[in-house]
Image (cartoon, grey):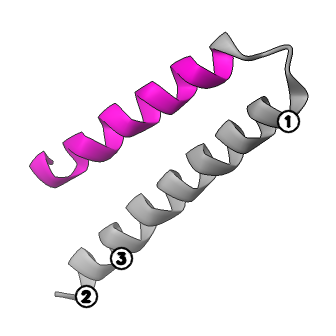
Amino acid sequence: MKTYLIYIFLMIAITIAAIDTWGETSKTIMYGIALVSTLALIAMKAGEKREN
């Protein structure tokens, strides 16, 4: 759980930034892409841990 803590904080920061720039389409899309990328990274790390 400790290894995922930094990713959770990163997701919270990206979500707050996305909400803050909600009216600006290009920034909101960029933050959405960053959030999805972070979630994919967490999924990849979880898959690696299961294999080990």
Amino acid, disc 2: Glu
Residue 15 left/right relative to 2 = right
Q: Magenta segment: does it hold 2?
A: yes
First of labels 3, 1 by sequence position: 1
Instruction: Name the residue located 44 percent from the left edge and 64 percent from the top edge.
Output: 41
The residues tagged by marks 3 and 1 sit, at their Cα atoms, a distance apart of 32 Å
Residue 22 left/right relative to 20 = right
Amino acid, disc 1: Ser
The residues tagged by marks 3 and 2 sit, at their Cα atoms, a distance apart of 6 Å
Q: Is the Cβ of the residue at disc 3 closer than 8 Å to that at disc 2?
A: yes
User: Can you tell which quarter of the image residue 12 is in?
Assistant: top left
Instruction: Name the residue located 66 percent from the left edge and 15 percent from the top edge.
Output: 19
Amino acid, disc 3: Gly
First of labels 1, 2 by sequence position: 1
The prevailing secondary structure element of the residues shown in magenta is helix
Q: Depth check: 21 or 42 in front?
A: 21
Looking at the rendered structure, the secondary structure element under dot 2 is: helix
Residue 30 left/right relative to 24 = left
Disc 3 designates what residue?
A: 47
Instruction: Name the residue located 21 percent from the left edge and 41 percent from the top edge.
Output: 5
Q: Depth check: 38 or 24 in front?
A: 24
Residue 4 in the image: state x and y as whole percent. 24, 49
Q: Which mark is residue 26?
A: 1
Q: Which mark is residue 51?
A: 2
The residues tagged by marks 1 and 2 sit, at their Cα atoms, a distance apart of 38 Å
Which span is picked out in magenta? 1-19
